[in-house]
Amino acid sequence: MALEKEYIDRITKYVRWLIAVVVVFLVSGIGLVVYQYRANQVIEPSFDSKIVVDPSKVQGASASKEGYRSKFEDTKKINTYATASRTPLEELQGSITPSDLHFERHHAGIPEIDPEQHELLIHGLLDKPIRLKLSDLKKYPSVSRICFIECSGNFRYGKREMTPGEVCGLTSQSEWTGVLLSTVLRDLGVKADAKWLLAEGADGALMARSVPLQEALTEAIIAYGQNGEAIRPQQGYPMRLVIPGFEGNTQIKWLRRIELTDEPVMTREETSKYTEKIKDGKIRMFSLVMDARSIITFPSYPKKIEKGWQELRGIAWSGRGKVKRVLVSVDNGQTWQDAHLQGPVLEKAHTAFRFMWNWDGKPTRVLSKAIDETGYEQPTYNQLVEARGEKGGYHFNPVVGWDIEKSGETFLADVKDI
């Protein structure tokens, strides 16, 4: 019995020793894991003791097939109605608009087009009509051109709580790649009486516009690329017409037909639409070129500034050529000073401008106006109304300003008081 008891005690001692060893190992392992976890963290000294993982201490995401914005950025277009969405001008950096933020304007939705099935017919006053698939178009010498596209109805106002994108966000800028229309027509035998062209889209509205042939041949591009990739469906995939400086509705998307004619076809979009009333009951037609304009994008609603040095930022553009000057006023138009233009200043392109200003904390109004190389100066709202007898409509490009309140809050100024 004594030997048996001694044997049991010895076994019990070994079991306890083994349990103790296991416990020590477990505690040590857990302690090591906790230590390493805590060592890979930075405690951010803030009122809520927020813990932030140090990105330099962890493995980052692997390569992806498609780029994406940071989760901390939430830049999106501004939807105003079913057929249009605006570019958030106040959120952009520089002068190029990301393809997914390019404004949209369509009349019957966005068609889904297979480029293998799509054809462009070029006919009319030509010796040799032609049908081109996308692959055929890409056999021609290509060109790339940076320019803006703007809807002719690009202006809204009416309340103080409006952003630059809500005011005039129906303008965007891209690098367009394709073939000069003149290159395609060169060998087709354009007849002497051809003075106009009709461009028609493959959308449900069969959007179509007449354009003077001579002006179109100068710069028009049948484009299939945008900002280094294929044109996106919202912008006319697989091909569209780009005519730098012309109003957006002439730059037909989903292009399927170009007909050379001796006179304008007088489509719905150039008779009942896209015309402007002027004085004495007259109507102005075929006002195709977009006039010079500008807008300050910072400070602007809903931004709030603090007393001291501010960098006023904005964009200016003209369909007539280069922006020559942008004048800025920080005292409601009493005095004007030249803003700095970001180079290179391109023809018929958005030009970024900047102006350093030391705000004294008093309420004021900041304004900008563009002057292009032809000498055209962006008018005020009241000057436009005086000239046209109308308080809005197409090609309405008034000087826009922002009211800075004592609190630093910024609101859209009443254009009628500028």
Image (cartoon, rainbow, N blue to C red):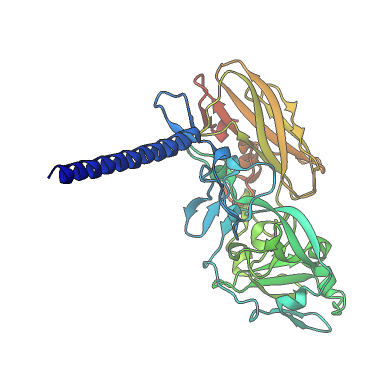
Disc tally is: 0
Q: Nearer the viewer, residue 82 or 20?
A: 20
Q: Is residue 391 visible?
A: no
Is 224 rendered above or below residue 282? below
Residue 352, visible in the rendered structure? yes
User: In this picture, is 82 found above or below 182?
Assistant: above
Residue 112 location, x and y as percent? 56, 72
22 and 56: which is toward the camera: 22
Q: Where is residue 360 in the image (x, y as percent from the top left)?
A: 60, 15
Location of residue 336 in the rendering, given as x and y in whole percent from the top left corner: 72, 25
Q: Tell me which corner region of the image, top left, top right, bottom left or bottom right, holds residue 283.
A: bottom right
Q: In this view, does 135 lie to the left or right of 12?
A: right
Q: Residue furthest bottom?
A: 128
The quarter of the picture where the C terminus appears is top right
Which residue: 31% across, 43% down? 18
Residue furthest toward the left?
Answer: 1
Quarter of the picture containing the N terminus is top left
Q: Where is residue 271 in the image (x, y as percent from the top left)?
A: 61, 64
Q: Which residue is drawn at 73% across and 31% down?
A: 327
The quarter holding residue 110 reads: bottom right
Residue 69 shown left or right of residue 15 in the figure:
right
Quadrant of residue 305 within the rendered picture: top right
For the residue pair 277 and 195, the one nearer the viewer reads as 195
Image: 125 above or below 17: below
